[in-house]
Image (spheres, rainbow, N blue to C red):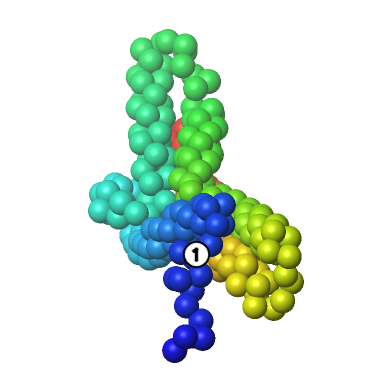
Amino acid sequence: MPNQFDIIQIVSEAGLMVQFVLLLLLFFSVTSWAIIIVKFRYLKRAFRESERFTEYFWKSRDLAGAYARSKQLKSSPIARIFRIGYLELKKVAQTMQADGADRSRGHDDHVFLAPYGADTIERALRRAINSETARMTQMVPFLATTGNTTPFIGLFGTVWGIMHSFHGIGARGSASLAVVAPGISEALIATAAGLAVAIPAVIAFNYFMQRIRLLETELQSFAADFLNIVERDILARKGR
């Protein structure tokens, strides 16, 4: 049908600037969808494996067994911060053992190290949480950039296309609908493309940030619970 709307033909007949804008929007679209797919799969695995690890941790309460289990759940942020906290706990325990040995020999050089063991573990957990938060939010800001900029990029292509169309009208000396409509339609393609790129990016950004905030809250809660267990363990060791 000669009057059928053919977007491919419209794009192929558009001006160079409009085509460049559409090519730029295509780059934003492909990159955004790649990030959406990768980040969705990453967060899905993170939630699933973190749930498995916390369930195992609270059922067993065996730190050594939980450490072995955490190595199997490589996509769990909670398992990763537990490994860091557990390794730091072992260092503190070794220091406290050395402290006890020194005191049994009459040396008191390390007698004040034990009370600061929990603080050392807390700092390690805080650094681990910050690292995991940075890992989870990686690439997500690009979605916000896409949602904020692509409508304006598309609008720029539209404005440029309309300017080009009016220039053609002036050169022909005719302003009939048959002359104006093709140029306006090819110009408006850029705005439509910009919105088509921006809307999924904004939706995905808001969804991912909500999930990341939820997971970050779980990290904070687990770190606090783990630190309480560690402090009780240190106090028990000191009381012996």
Which of the 4 image quarters holds residue 170? bottom right
Q: Quadrant of the N terminus?
A: bottom left
Q: Residues within 10 Å of mark 1 (few under 14, many from 20)?
A: some
Which amino acid type corresponds to the residue marked 1 in the rendered image?
A: Glu
Q: Quadrant of the C terminus?
A: top left
Residue in the foreground of this view, choosing between 29 and 43: 29
Query: Measured from the top left, where is residue 201 in percent x and y?
Result: 55, 62
Query: Measured from the top left, where is residue 37 in percent x and y?
Result: 40, 62
Can residue 20 be seen from the camera position used here? yes
Residue in the foreground of this view, choosing between 216 and 209: 209
Which of the 4 image quarters holds residue 206? bottom right
Query: Measured from the top left, where is residue 139 in percent x and y?
Result: 48, 49
Secondary structure beneath disc 1? loop
Can residue 216 be seen from the camera position used here? no
Residue in the foreground of this view, choosing between 48 and 144: 144
Is 228 left or right of 67, judged from the image as shown? right
Residue at figure coordinates x 27%, y 49% from the top left: 71
In the picture of the structure, the residue carrying the numbered disc 1 is 13
Residue at figure coordinates x 72%, y 70% from the top left: 174
Location of residue 187 with respect to 239 vertically, above or below: below
